[in-house]
Amino acid sequence: MSPIMNEIGTVFIPVSDIEKARDWYSDLLGLPIEGEILFGHLYIVPMKGTGLVLDSKIYSENNIFNAPAIQLHTKNIEEAYAFMEAKQIELTTKIQHNQWFNFKDPDGNVLMVCAC
């Protein structure tokens, strides 16, 4: 039996500016800006389920996600897509199969929104 659990604890996202990233992700997710920036480079986004940590220490242009490493859920894919368009967030795909689309954060990390 493995001592490693089949459970994802946290995903780290490389960001260039921790304060701007904190504000952008909080706005995207409709969250108040809570908590502090830890050690000058980490911000823990208050999430349900798997944790999300923004980290400016691991950022480099060669270290961004070029394919979705995380998937955010929505109950209404069309509403989520329109929300992103209204915020002028860079959408990298249209809605696919009525289920999902990809977008980029300000640092170029590719993320996904998927209907649940």
Image (cartoon, rainbow, N blue to C red):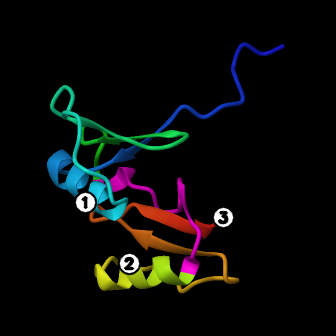
Q: CA distance from mark 2 to mark 1?
A: 12 Å
User: Which amino acid lies under the numbered mark 1 shown in the image of this protein?
Assistant: Trp
Determine whether the residue tagged by mark 1 lies in a helix, strand or loop: helix
In percent of the image, x 29 and y 79: which residue is there?
87
Q: Residues within 10 Å of mark 1 (few under 14, many from 20)?
A: some
Against 89, is 107 above or below?
above
For residue 4, above or below residue 70 = above
Which residue sits at x=31%, y=84%? 86
Could you say which is closer to the camera, residue 98 or residue 41? Answer: 98
Give the residue number, with chain letter if any, for mark 2: 84
64 sits left or right of 57 in the view: right
Precedes in sequence: disc 3 or disc 2: 2
Quarter holding the C terminus is bottom right
> Label 1, on which residue?
24
Q: Can you say which quadrant of the picture contains the N terminus?
A: top right
The x and y percentages for residue 26 are 29, 55
* Residue 38 coordinates in the image, percent (x, y): 21, 28
Which corner quadrant of the image does residue 28 belong to? bottom left
The amino acid type, in three-letter code, at marker 2 is: Met
Q: Decide whether residue 43 is among the magenta residues.
A: no
Question: Is 24 positioned to the left or the right of 68 in the image?
Answer: left
Residue 76 located within the stretch drawn in magenta: yes
Instruction: Report the residue marked by disc 3.
Output: 116
Looking at the picture, how far across and down is residue 94, in whole percent? 54, 86
Residue found at the very far right of the displayed protein: 1
Three-letter amino acid code at the position of disc 3: Cys
- The stretch of residues the image draws in magenta is 61-77
Seen at 39% across and 60% down, the residue is 109
Around disc 2, counting alpha carbons within 10 Å, would you say few (fewer than 14), some (14 to 19), or many (20 or more)? some
